[in-house]
Image (tube, grey):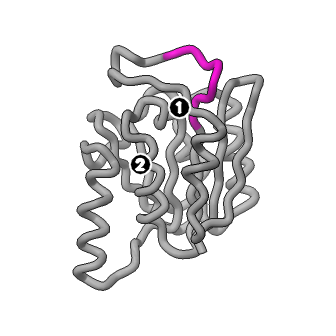
Amino acid sequence: MHSAAHSFVERLSKQFPPHFSYVHVLEVGSCWINVDVRDLFFACKFSGIDHLQGKNVDRVRWFHEWADVYLRSCRILRTEPEYKTVFSTEALEHDPFAERTVKAMIDVCFPGGLIFLTCAGIGREPHFLETTGHYKNLTLVELQQWFTDKRLVSHIEENQIDHDLYVWAIKE
């Protein structure tokens, strides 16, 4: 992760402090590559899911597959999802199921919870192909379409200098 993406999350931690302290946090694409944002959270319980094994990964699986099982268990037990903050930083461009992943991130977030992501936009050079096997720069239009869920109040921005896309959403 580069400094601009980390700065976006740091800004969110100041804008939405209750979502960065004493909550259960779900990190999507959690395998530590070079830098993470866990330092911006205080006294949180983390769960990390990634299709790669590594540091910060609790479950190795494609996120949308894990979410299907998790949500089925919530329905059976008649419980709400437990995650108050759900995020993905610099991972969606490596996910061949990115749209399904975003939809699942919304579904597994507790009502009133925060969902945020950073990802590579048009113009970013492909990276980590040898590790992940997939790379696709996402577009502003794709994210706008994926975050039209009526349960959300969302904000999407584009960093044209670093070729990044940033999203935050509150699930109502």
Badge 1 or badge 2: first in the primary sequence: 1
**Side of 46 where 161 appears, left or right:** right
Residue 123 lies in the magenta-colored region: yes
Task: Kindly state the secondary structure of the residue where label 1 is placed.
Answer: loop
From the image, tell me which residue sits under label 1: 35
Q: Main secondary structure of the magenta part?
A: loop
Above or below for 82 versus 62: below
Kind of residue indicated by mark 2: Thr
How many discs mark residues in the rendered view?
A: 2
Tell me which residue sits at (34%, 82%) in the image.
79
Alpha carbon separation for disc pair 1 and 2: 22 Å
Quadrant holding the C terminus: bottom right
Question: Residue 7 at x, y = what percent?
Answer: 71, 39
Q: Nearer the viewer, mark 1 or mark 2?
A: 2
Quadrant holding the N terminus: top right
Q: Nearer the viewer, residue 23 or 156?
A: 156
Question: Residue 63 at x, y = what percent?
Answer: 34, 48
Tell me which residue sits at (29%, 48%) in the image.
58
Q: Nearer the viewer, residue 154 or 132?
A: 154
What's drawn in magenta, residue-wise?
119-126
Kind of residue indicated by mark 1: Val
Task: Indicate which disc residue 111 carries.
Answer: none
Question: Residue 115 at x, y = what percent?
Answer: 56, 58
Please identify the quarter of the rendering in which residue 21 is found: bottom right
Q: Nearer the viewer, residue 38 or 73?
A: 73
Tell me which residue sits at (41%, 72%) in the image.
82
Residue 122 lies in the magenta-colored region: yes
Tell me which residue sits at (63%, 59%) in the image.
169
Crowdedness near tag 1: few (<14), some (14–19) or many (≥20) residues, C-alpha within 10 Å: few
Q: Do labels 1 and 2 touch, CB within 8 Å?
A: no
Task: Indicate which disc residue 101 carries.
Answer: 2
